[in-house]
């Protein structure tokens, strides 16, 4: 039986998928997006956060059975309004074997995988195939820009997007809008070209940048160093999506 590390379990979540949900935030992420709003999810290890309210531990170990038992105890909640369980992070695929083992022990709720898409094909396929819906982040299509702003190459992400399309699992593309980085006409048009015609695509969600993103860094003993100018005006342009006949919404 596998053990995983979770930094938060949010009950009654209403923004992490359809219906009322329980969202499990798993520790560890291979990306270092300069706009990350969950820096406590980056390290795979438990860590103490220190702030004005005192100290708290971000990261608790669970066996797959312990986590599944906790989620199964909320079965009545998970069935409200087509609700279910969302696995997020961090990057849940950084603990893919653990997540897959948890899913296998659940009492058949709706399972949503919220992922950056950055993982080896085997890990991605293993968890995505056990999910009823995938939220797939697509930040930048240009590989050089992706490396600059997230610290990793985007080729594994684009490859896993193609794998997801082949699996036939419904998915939502989520684009964080970062001023002068991801919100440009060139990048949004490239995203449209990448996903247009994929039969599993349900819609595209645009997520405007939240200027409170850097607030947690000091508590984590980290320095917030954005690779963009927060003062720049955000461009929220839906035209390229609508002209391609894609369903889009601003979250």
Image: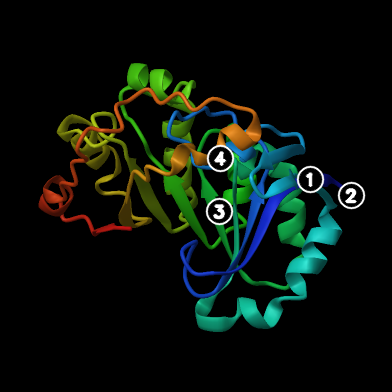
- Please tell me whether mark 4 sits on a helix, a strand or a loop: helix
Residue at image point 27% right, 38% down: 191
Q: Position of residue 106 (x, y in %)?
A: 74, 67
Residue closest to the eye, 10 or 215: 215
Compared to 90, does 111 lie above or below? below
Is residue 199 at least partly visible in the picture? yes
* Residues marked 1 and 3 touching at CB (< 8 Å): no
- Which quadrant of the structure image shows residue 137? top left
Q: CA distance from mark 1 to mark 3?
A: 16 Å
- First reached walking from the N terminus: tag 1 or tag 3: 1
Q: Mark 4, mark 1: which one is toward the viewer?
A: 4
| Mark number, residue 216 | 4
Task: Tell me the CA gap for discs 2 and 1.
Answer: 10 Å
Quickly name the residue at label 3.
Answer: 113
Mark closer to the observer (4, 3): 4
* Residue contact at pointers 2 and 3, CB within 8 angstroms: no
Query: Of residues 90 and 199, which is closer to you in this image?
Result: 90
Q: Residues within 10 Å of mark 4 (few under 14, many from 20)?
A: many
Disc assigned to residue 180: none
Q: CA distance from mark 4 to mark 3?
A: 24 Å
How far apart marks 4 and 1 lie (CA) works out to 23 Å
Q: Residue at x 79, y 67 (%)?
A: 70
Residue linked to disc 1: 4
Task: Tell me the crowding category of disc 3: few under 14, some 14 to 19, or many 20 or more residues within 10 angstroms, Cα based.
Answer: many
- Closer to the camera, 236 or 93? 236
In the image: residue 203, left or right of residue 137: left
Q: Secondary structure at mark 3?
A: strand
Labels 2 & 1 near each other (Cβ < 8 A): no
Q: Which residue is mark 2?
A: 1
């Amino acid at each position: 039986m596998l053990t995983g590390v979770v930094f938060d379990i949010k009950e009654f979540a209403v923004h992490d998928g359809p219906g009322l949900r329980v969202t499990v935030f798993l520790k560890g992420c291979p990306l270092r997006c300069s706009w990350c709003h969950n820096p406590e999810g980056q390290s795979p290890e438990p860590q103490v956060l220190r702030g004005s309210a005192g100290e708290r531990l971000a990261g608790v170990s669970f066996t797959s059975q312990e986590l599944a038992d906790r989620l199964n105890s909320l079965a009545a909640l998970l069935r409200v309004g087509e609700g279910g369980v969302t696995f997020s992070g961090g990057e849940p695929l950084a603990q893919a074997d653990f997540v897959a083992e948890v899913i296998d022990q659940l009492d058949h709720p709706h399972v949503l995988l919220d992922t950056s898409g950055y993982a080896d094909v085997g890990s991605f396929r293993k968890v995505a195939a056990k999910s009823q819906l995938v939220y797939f982040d697509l930040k930048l299509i240009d590989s050089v820009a992706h490396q600059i702003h997230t610290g990793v190459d985007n080729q594994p992400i684009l490859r896993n997007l193609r794998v997801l399309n082949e699996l036939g699992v419904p998915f939502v593309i989520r684009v964080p809008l970062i001023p002068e980085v991801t919100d440009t006409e060139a990048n949004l048009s490239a995203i449209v070209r990448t996903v247009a015609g994929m039969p599993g695509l349900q819609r595209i969600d645009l997520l405007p940048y939240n200027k409170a993103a850097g607030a947690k860094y000091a508590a984590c003993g980290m320095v917030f160093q954005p690779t963009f100018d927060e003062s720049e005006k955000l461009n929220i342009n839906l035209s390229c999506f609508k002209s391609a006949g894609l369903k889009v919404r601003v979250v």
